[in-house]
Amino acid sequence: MLDSYRLRSVCTLPFVCHKKINTVGNSNADVPLADPGMYQLDITLRRGQSLAARDRGGTSDPYVKFKIGRKEVFRSKIIHKNLNPVWEEKACIIVDHLREPLYIKVFDYDFGLQDDFMGSAFLDLTQLELNRSTDVTLTLKDPHYPDHDLGIILLSVTLTPKEGEPRDVTMLRRKSWKRSSKFQTQSLRLSDQHRKSHLWRGIVSITLIEGRDLKAMDSNGLSDPYVKFRLGHQKYKSKIMPKTLNPQWREQFDFHLYEERGGIIDITAWDRDAGKRDDFIGRCQVDLSSLSREQTHKLELQLEEGEGHLVLLVTLTASATVSISDLSVHSLEDKKERGEILKRYSPLRIFNNIKDVGFLQVKVIRAEGLMAADVTGKSDPFCVVELNNDRLLTHTVYKNLSPEWNKVFTFNIKDIHSVLEVTVYDEDRDRSADFLGRVAIPLLSIQNGEQKAYVLKNKQLTGPTKGVIYLEIDVIFNAVKASLRTLIPKEQKYIEEENRLSKQLLLRNFIRTKRCVMVLVNAVYYVNSCFDWDSPPRSLAAFVLFLFVVWNFELYMIPLLLLSLLTWNYFLIISGKDNRQRDTVVEDMLEDEEEEDDKDDKDGEKKGFINKIYAIQEVCVSVQNILDDVASFGERIKNTFNWTVPFLSWLAIVALCVFTVVLYLIPLRYIVLVWGINKFTKKLRSPYAIDNNELLDFLSRVPSDVQVVQYQELKPDHSHSPFKRKKNTLG
């Protein structure tokens, strides 16, 4: 996942009066240079005039960066092919002091190349009058060519002292870097009125079925369409359907519904163009307030500003079991409420809301020995708890390396194979939050009611970082529902870290794929050695076995053989002869990848050769991802038989037993006949059914070797515990 970051939630003050100033003037006597107080700087980026031309056509694609103390605090949108751009964008910045000026830098955006510098200026904050809106005209200059006229930038600024700002209202925002040099944010607010109540009031389930007669955007008379959905801060992007005007998506996803009366879903259709900006096909909206609840609505939406229709299924349901409360008030402590939860997920209620698999309660108690992220030697830690697309957070504990949160989070479990992620960040007022540590806990590995100290890991979950976090987790679920859910497509995360080209990652995926292929190669070599009679006793035994199996072969023997392999490995494990070895090769590769990521972070602002050949990078990333998919597929099969996740291995045993009995009792021709009839009549019986492969859906729940390493629980180092040091001191 890309790094999340937190900004202070503040309001933009109205402009009181207007006064035009230049960048040079008398200092405001009311604002001392060493004022230790905090200030809120509200900026409206108005427009630019007579900017420098940097492109061959005599134009530019300008955007503006604001920096304070070498830290970027704002970046505007790009205005294409315009030397007199109009932005009208607002930014709100919290500054600790006024000693550092506000630097304004203008660049010309060049796709895949180094952006061209168009000039810079600075604004001395000590010249601004407090609590007054001021129009500012900045003359752009190039330090290397001070005589060149590079145009002007017009701003409106308001400087307001901040005293006693409430710290319990915070905002978590997610920053993602797009190739168009734009920032998108994903925010989740947490306020006092929501602390002991549901954070969202319902679920909007959307199935994107198909598009009809879409507009042709490519020269071949076709398009490569995909669809974007937006409800408030929530976003979803469909897969791309190549070369068609009548795409069939069959994709299902959920949005959280925060407003009682509903909301508006904005839908836009796009044509994918590799190497350049995607073409706009059309837009439409869905007004949720006009739809009845607990009912599925089929909608055929006409695309505005374009051609064609989109077909959707939309269902509004009641709120899921997601809440946040204090440690003193939580569900499982109340015997009556606990009994109702156990009854809800009892084995007898299998077909009651098949999507509601279970209940998860997470107590975030405290952390110890966190990393110091501030210059004062302290941190301002807060905690983010995520389960798939559900994300909640604690309050911030300021200036503390051993914070106590004492919060209880409850989630509705849709998939028992989900992974709970708990991440600790350091809050910063005017820039992205600093990462302090993370743990990833598969739900099936949780021991109910046990308070455990989890060692925090790095961003890649490959090694320890400083500190531990104390959690107490309870999972209650219906095993039959969980098993059925395993055969349904896995829920996709709406917001994931964008893939980038990495030499170490490419090498790692190649080695993983090679290891899987070598298993097959070695098996072929072994069979050939039997044919060549390299070892006469072994070849004789193989020959007799071959004659016996071929003469007596029945189809049911295939699942029976796989069942025997699972059973054999199970008895090896319970007898203490565990043949599962820790994958040190994967761990070493992950550590190398982490070092490369750290190096990339340090050189993040230096654009290298890869950015100049973006088309080649996209191909390399695709190859890298294909290697990852192939390697993961082989590793998931291996880990199923190695009992890496016992729940899934037991499920495989049950399925193989059923298949063995069915194949033994029922002739193959009848099975093929039933399979063919089901395939031919599936669309007739359920026109909007989402295609899936139960075997692949099952394997998607089995962790790959990389995930096994990431989910490993590290043992805490008690020698660094603060409580132990205190005890030793007292002793």
Image (cartoon, rainbow, N blue to C red):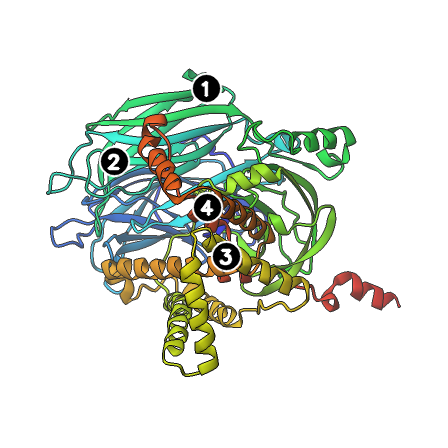
Residue farthest to the right, as pictured: 731
Badges 4 and 2: C-beta atoms under 8 Å apart? no
Task: First in sequence, mark 1 or 2: give its number.
Answer: 2
Query: Which residue is found at the position 60% from the left and 30% from the top?
Result: 198
Q: Which residue is mark 3?
A: 562
Q: Are marks 4 and 1 in contact (CB under 8 Å)?
A: no
Residue 406 is situated, as x and y percent measured from the top left of the image, at 71, 44
Quarter occupied by residue 89: top left
Between marks 4 and 3 in the image, the one whose residue lies nearer the viewer: 4
Label 1 CA crowd tier, 10 Å (few <14, some 14–19, many 20+): few
Identify the disc placed on residue 663: 4
Q: Relative to 490, is 728 on the left or the right?
A: right
Q: Residue 295 — which label?
A: 1
Q: Is 25 placed above or below 114 here?
A: above
Q: Position of residue 66 (x, y in %)?
A: 38, 50
The answer to whether 311 is drawn above or below residue 150 in the figure is above
- Any mark on residue 247, and which? 2
Front one among 319 and 379:
319
Q: Secondary structure at mark 3?
A: helix
Mark 3 and mark 2: Cα distance apart in space: 39 Å
Q: Amino acid at mark 3?
A: Leu
**Three-letter amino acid code of the residue under disc 1:** Gln
Which mark's residue is nearer the viewer, 4 or 1? 4
Q: Secondary structure at mark 2?
A: loop
Across and down, in percent, residue 521 comes to 37, 71
- Residue 501 lies, in percent from the top left, at 34, 62
Residue 490 visible (yes or no): yes
Alpha carbons under labels 4 and 2: distance apart: 38 Å
Nearest to the observer: residue 335 or residue 165: 335
Question: Is disc 1 placed on a helix, strand or loop?
Answer: loop
